[in-house]
Image (tube, helix red, strand yellow):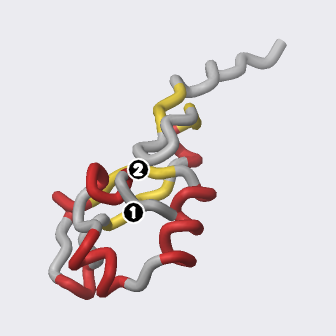
Amino acid sequence: MPVYAPDPIPEPCRLCDRPFPRPRLTRHHCKPKSKGGTVADIELVCPQCHGMVHATFTNATLAAVYPTIDKLRTAPE
């Protein structure tokens, strides 16, 4: 009989708070690398939120207006 690994413990997306297995979350640089962001600026977000962020905002806007996950949560979009 095969032994199955248990499902990973879900972690919340840092934007929408929906739970996802960690491997499904993507790394979002709150301050874009092209604007000087480092690993300290990374937050784990779900693919849906990550796509929406980059479809809505330019890297310049993310760096200037929403350089942290808390600021990004305040975005009216």
Query: Residue type at mark 2?
Result: Leu
Q: Quadrant of residue 63?
A: bottom left
Amino acid type at mark 1? His
- Residue extending furthest front? 76
Specify whether 63 is left or right of 76: left
Q: Quick one: label 2, few (<14), some, or many (20+) residues within 10 Å?
A: many
Closest to the observer, 2 or 67:
67
**Helix, strand or loop for disc 1:** strand
In the image, residue 64 above or below residue 14: below
Q: Residue at x 30, y 53 (%)?
A: 69
Q: Secondary structure at mark 2?
A: strand
Where is residue 67? Give x, y as percent: 23, 67
Write the residue at 45% across / 78% down: 57
In the rendered image, which residue does mark 2 sit on? 44
**Which residue sits at x=71%, y=21%?**
4
Q: Earlier in the sequence, mark 1 or mark 2?
A: 1
- Residue 28 marker: 1
Q: Position of residue 59 (x, y in %)?
A: 35, 83
Counting labels gives: 2
Q: Position of residue 12 (x, y in %)?
A: 47, 34
Image position of 14 with respect to 52: above or below: above
Answer whether labels 1 and 2 touch (C-beta < 8 Å). yes
The N terminus, quarter of image: top right
